Image: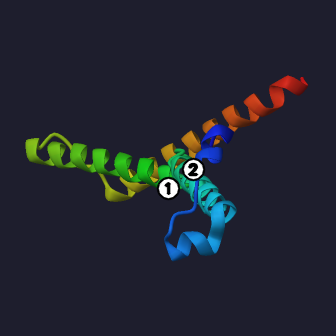
Amino acid sequence: MHPFEESLLEAEDNSFAQLLGEDGLLFLVNLFFWLLWVNILLGFTNLIPMVPFDGGHMFKDMLRGVLNAVKNLGRKLKFWDINPMWIEHISSKASNISSLALLGMILFIILIPYL
């Protein structure tokens, strides 16, 4: 909050506001503001498509769903039939490779200034 805006604040006649005072209200406002930002940033960080994060599991499940759709299409058209273990193997490999590639990119960005 801007210092000019802080100077305009006054504790109202409310018993809770009078109990906390202006400093207590400013502390609560800042606390909730930073809790909100940490929560939002943690949520976006969790969507990174690497295996330990939820984004990696979402990528693996999405790829498994696409491969299952291809399997069902081939079975309906009687062109091919894909083994379910092959689908699981390919989705796990693709998820692991994408996680390692992303980890490599992050390490490259972090370490490039020192080289």
Pointers 1 and 2 in contact (C-beta within 8 Å): no
Question: Mark 1 and mark 2: span between their CA atoms?
Answer: 19 Å
| Picture quarter with the C terminus | top right
Q: Is residue 112 left or right of residue 100?
A: right
Of 44 and 22, nearer the camera is 22
Image coords of residue 89 (percent x, y): 45, 53
Determine which of the numbered discs, if any, sits on residue 37 in the image: 2
Q: Could you tell me which quadrant the N terminus lies in?
A: top right
Residue in the image at 52% along x and 64% along y:
12
Secondary element at image label 1: helix
* Closer to us: 82 or 93: 93
Q: Vertically, is 41 above or below 109? A: below
Label 2, residues with CA under 10 Å away: few <14, some 14-19, many ≥20: few
Image disc number at residue 54: 1
Determine which quarter of the picture holds residue 23.
Answer: bottom right
Most extreme residue toward the front, as rendered?
13
Asked if one can make out residue 52 in the rendered structure from this viewpoint, the answer is: no
Disc 1: CA contacts within 10 A as few (<14), some (14-19) or many (>=20): some
Percent coordinates x, y for residue 9 in the rendering = 58, 51
Taking the spot 54% from the left edge, 45% from the top edge, the residue there is 48
Query: Is residue 80 toward the left or the right of residue 34 in the image?
Result: left
Name the spot of residue 86 as percent of width and height, x first.
Answer: 39, 52
| x then y, percent, for residue 17 | 56, 69
Q: Is residue 88 something that shows in the picture?
A: yes
